[in-house]
């Protein structure tokens, strides 16, 4: 049976079967198709889900959606949330307002939007790339060898199809067929039974914050939707009595808030026992798992969907490069090397969040007002808590500092492994807007500050554009920036380095680039490498983790090693010495 998925640009390139059309599978399919691969996306459900388990899109995921080109559609359907307010036994304890001063981002808020709405935006974007979802098509089984994957697909009419494909990505949820067939165990523990409900609520509470409400014996959460008067409720102790959810929610919320609250009949409810489990690895041969197929945990901090989307984005650019022959297979191993530790940390953080959210301790009603009186009145303590909570939930502090793809240099600008988007947060600034547009490119980005003396850096930048232009965008900033801007996307190969607009030097300062300095940014927007001066040797070292690449070509004639008056010697030293000027011997030896 022919696939109903279309064939986007690059129809002759490698094919990928993505199983599961939730937000994680849709993200993986979108990013693979955007990079020119042919994608087939199947889901065993008869159609899109109407209910929404996940309702929060955090700042780092919004940055990712911006890079994907879909953020405007998501923002239009959601409500921006910038606060977290706590009540206990009828008294307001504290309101924690969003504080992203130490985590600069263009999206300093979480967006409250139903998962079904998020999926709708992603499906529309995927359709623009010529890819549709094949509903009712279930993965029955599969086997793989060194050449590819042979999958048995079961169709709604009862027929079966044998489908051979080079790559398989399992985004098929907590009961993942892909995970089970690969023999990947979910390690961890069972946890609590909670209830979710989408309901109309009559209350005078302003819908500009998430509410945590403690009744004296248990806790609930209230999350305001964009739809006027409708809220997501989370009950950490739903009890065994079926039905009558509206009355029970009304009684509990009224007791915790100290004001009358009337909850209408739910549009959707779910009582579930969540677990805290994850796989020990996320990659086996030509098969991968992401999202709930790789880890399941508490919804307390709203991390599940956000983490899965980040995984899908991380995997897609790596798989596309390997499938297109632009990098070695060793690049694929970095998917698990980077994401498994994050999954482990997530299990730990959600376990803590679960304890804090449900707070069943009988002394809570007495202790909470005392504790949060100090929090409310001591400004530094309140700000520290705000930043700690936001830092853990937002995804903005995630770093790939220890990744095999990260090449640290003591003389680079932004820290290795950090988000380049932090330098693009100033609205209206030409440099920030230019970097924001650059991060939407599907390629790596090499940004060189062209204001330094000599031709070594210019020669290295031009050589990189010629040799790797199909997967590397080479851009210049600074007074010496010039060249021909490269075409965006896999189809365009630039003729040379293209300038990034930065008339006021705001971008250079935000990136930490001094004259002659450079940064190498991965396709997912994280800094992989950088240094005080761009040379062929330094760039080759930074790109080495991708596997064997075509050489950059012979070096150009070196400029005079005599520094110009008033210049930092690091900007004019020879390639062998340039990266070592001013570095203590102990640090230099460790770096070597």
Image (cartoon, grey):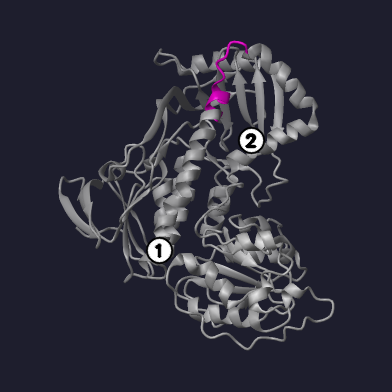
Please tell me which residue is depicted at 61% across the width and 55% down the height of the picture.
419
Does residue 322 appear in the picture of this structure? Answer: yes
Crowding at mark 1 (Cα within 10 Å: few <14, some 14-19, many 20+): many
Label whose residue precedes the other's in the sequence (1 or 2): 1
Which quadrant would the C terminus be assigned to in this image? bottom right
- Against 21, residue 320 (above or below) is below
**Camera-nearest residue between 498 and 519:** 519
In space, the residues marked 1 and 2 are separated at their CA atoms by 35 Å
Badge 1 element: helix
Please tell me which residue is depicted at 73% across the width and 75% down the height of the picture.
571
Q: Which residue position holds label 2?
A: 389
Q: Residue 309 has which mark? A: none
In the orientation shown, which residue stands out farthest toward the right? 566
Write down the region rendered in magenta.
353-363
- Against 227, residue 548 (above or below) is below
Badge 2 element: helix
**Camera-nearest residue between 470 and 418:** 418
Please tell me which residue is depicted at 30% across the width and 55% down the height of the picture.
285
Where in the figure is residue 586, as x and y percent of width and height?
Answer: 67, 59
Which quadrant would the N terminus be assigned to in this image? bottom left
Q: Is residue 360 magenta?
A: yes
Where in the figure is residue 458, as x and y percent of width and height?
Answer: 64, 81
1 and 2 marks in contact (CB < 8 Å):
no
Please tell me which residue is depicted at 42% across the width and 58% down the height of the picture.
316
Where in the figure is residue 133, as x and y percent of width and height?
Answer: 33, 52
**Camera-nearest residue between 47 and 471:** 471
Q: Which residue position holds label 1?
A: 320
Q: Say whether residue 135 is left or right of residue 362.
A: left
In the orientation shown, which residue stands out farthest toward the bottom? 557
Which quadrant holds residue 386? top right
Q: Is residue 354 magenta?
A: yes
């Amino acid at each position: 049976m022919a696939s109903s998925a279309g064939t986007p640009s690059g129809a002759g390139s490698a094919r990928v079967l993505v199983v599961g059309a939730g937000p994680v599978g849709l993200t993986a399919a979108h990013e693979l198709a955007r990079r020119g691969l042919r994608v087939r996306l199947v889901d065993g459900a008869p159609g899109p889900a109407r209910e929404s388990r996940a309702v929060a899109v955090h700042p780092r995921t919004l940055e990712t959606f911006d890079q994907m080109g879909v953020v405007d559609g998501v923002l239009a359907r959601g409500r921006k949330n910038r606060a977290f307010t706590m009540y206990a036994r009828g008294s307001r304890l504290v309101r924690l307002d969003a504080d992203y001063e130490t985590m600069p981002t263009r999206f300093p808020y979480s967006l409250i939007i139903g998962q079904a709405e998020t999926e709708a935006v992603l499906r529309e974007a995927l359709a623009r790339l010529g890819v549709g979802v094949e509903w009712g098509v279930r993965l029955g089984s599969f086997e793989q060898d060194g050449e590819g994957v042979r999958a048995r697909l079961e169709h709604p009419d009862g027929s079966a199809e044998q489908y051979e494909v080079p790559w398989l990505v399992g985004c098929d949820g907590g009961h993942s067929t892909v995970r089970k067939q690969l023999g990947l165990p979910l390690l961890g523990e069972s946890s609590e039974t909670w209830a979710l409900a989408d309901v109309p609520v009559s209350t005078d509470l302003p819908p500009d914050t998430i509410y945590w409400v403690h009744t004296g014996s248990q806790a609930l959460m209230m999350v305001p939707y964009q739809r006027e008067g409708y809220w997501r409720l989370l009950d950490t102790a739903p009890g065994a009595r079926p039905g009558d959810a509206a009355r029970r929610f009304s009684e509990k919320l009224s007791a915790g808030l100290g004001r009358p609250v009337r909850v209408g009949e739910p549009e959707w409810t779910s009582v579930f026992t969540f677990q805290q489990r994850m796989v020990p690895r996320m990659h086996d041969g030509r098969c991968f798992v992401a999202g709930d197929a790789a880890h399941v945990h508490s919804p307390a901090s709203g991390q599940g969907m956000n983490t899965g989307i980040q995984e899908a984005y991380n995997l897609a650019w790596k798989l596309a490069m390997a499938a297109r022959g632009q990098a070695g297979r060793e690049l694929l191993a970095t998917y698990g090397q980077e994401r498994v530790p994050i999954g482990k940390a997530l299990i730990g953080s959600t376990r803590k969040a679960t304890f804090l959210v449900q707070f069943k301790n009988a002394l809570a009603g007495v202790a909470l007002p005392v504790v949060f009186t100090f929090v409310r009145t001591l400004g530094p303590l309140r700000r520290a808590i705000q930043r700690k909570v936001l830092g853990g939930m937002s995804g903005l502090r995630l770093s790939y500092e220890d990744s095999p793809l990260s090449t640290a240099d003591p003389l680079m600008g932004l820290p290795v492994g950090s988000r380049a988007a932090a330098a693009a947060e100033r609205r209206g600034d030409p440099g920030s807007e230019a970097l924001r547009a650059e991060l939407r490119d599907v390629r790596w980005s090499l940004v060189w500050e062209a204001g330094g003396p000599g031709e070594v850096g210019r020669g290295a930048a031009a050589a990189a554009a010629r040799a790797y232009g199909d997967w590397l965008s080479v851009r210049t900033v600074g007074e010496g920036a010039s060249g021909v801007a490269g075409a965006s996307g896999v189809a365009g190969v630039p003729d040379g380095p293209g300038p990034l607009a930065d008339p006021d030097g705001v971008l250079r300062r935000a990136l930490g680039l001094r004259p002659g300095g450079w940064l190498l940014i991965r396709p997912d927007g994280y800094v992989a490498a950088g240094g005080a001066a761009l040379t062929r040797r330094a760039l080759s070292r930074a790109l080495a983790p991708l596997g064997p690449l075509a050489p950059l070509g012979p070096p150009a004639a070196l400029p005079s090693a005599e520094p110009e008056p008033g210049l930092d010697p690091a900007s004019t030293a020879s390639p062998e010495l340039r990266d070592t000027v001013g570095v203590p011997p102990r640090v230099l030896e460790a770096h070597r």
